[in-house]
Image (spheres, rainbow, N blue to C red):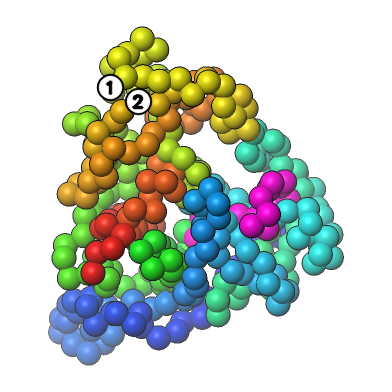
Amino acid sequence: MRKWAFLAALFGALVLSNRVPAQPREDGARQAQNCLLHVAAAVDMETMPDGRVTIPVKFEGHDHRLMVDTGGYINTVTPQLAREEGYATEVSHGNRLQGVGNRVLKTYVVSKDFSIGNAHGEDYEFYVDVFNNLFADGTLAPEILANYDVDLDFGHDRLNLIQPQHCAGGVVYWTKSPAIILPMEIEDRTHIRIPVTIDGKTIMATVDTGSAISIVTMRAATQFFGINEKSAGLQSRGIVAVNGMPAPVYVYPFQDLTFGGVTIRRPFIEIVSDAVWNKDDLLLGIDVLRQLHLYIAYGEKKLYVTSALAN
């Protein structure tokens, strides 16, 4: 594998950084300056028909769009993008990597110049994977995202990559009201898991902007909520493709999904067979997440949450 590095440009402090409380100590002005949020990249998000979002990027100076995938690990591009940019594919001799539907990814390309907004990276690896969507040319995963704080402003369709060197906790620039601060577990170096409460029961959830829907396994539905195939209110959706594989899918009238003090009423969460999804008890997809403003502080292992329209 080739080494890769991201050459992030340090631009001005976030426009609303005056809302971030400086915490000066003996060094006064220097400490106040360090408490500002410095933006490496700020771009508009576009919503695909299934609700997931893409951002504009450039490969070798050419415009493309990648889907934002906080639930992934590796970055991917489509075979078409690889051909358009004239990339030579290389075979990975390391760990076997899986794409959607458990496809094994074996080949990757290396970009000479990759950029998000005004931040540029060199020698980045992108695995080649079929992405059957006309609105995106691949996926952007925490392999890049986790080098930053990721600010997902769904209320204004903006994504900001923030330099992580700032005062601990001083990140909530978009509202004067308190944000909910949730501890994050990070699995497999990238997967974000947070505690949420559904109908009074606490369960760990994976935050996945790369999923169009939110799902819970039948095993977890039984363990945490006492739901099974015979439960009143459970409705079958029939056989539906999940993770690229057909499976029986159900829906249940959950009432409340709560992130600390932020509540989503009647969340739509599909219950799926453990045979096709056994990685996470609960996966929160974009259908739930886009109702929130999320600030992911990977370094602090904290997720800051408000409603999407908090101001």
Q: Position of residue 114 (x, y in %)?
A: 65, 70
Q: Which mark is residue 225?
A: 1
Q: Which residues are magenta?
A: 127-145
Q: Is residue 104 magenta?
A: no
Report crowding for label 2: few under 14, some 14 to 19, many 20 or more residues within 10 A (C-alpha).
some
Decide if residue 108 is in sight here: no
Decide if residue 79 is in sight here: yes
Q: Position of residue 211 (x, y in %)?
A: 50, 43
Describe the element under mark 2 as helix, strand or loop: loop
Q: Amino acid at mark 1?
A: Phe
Residue lying farthest to the bottom in this orientation: 29
Disc 2 and disc 1: Cα gap in Å? 11 Å
Q: Which mark is residue 252?
A: 2
Q: Is residue 136 magenta?
A: yes
The residue shown at (32%, 38%) is: 267
Report if the CB atoms under discs 2 and 1 are less than 8 Å apart: yes
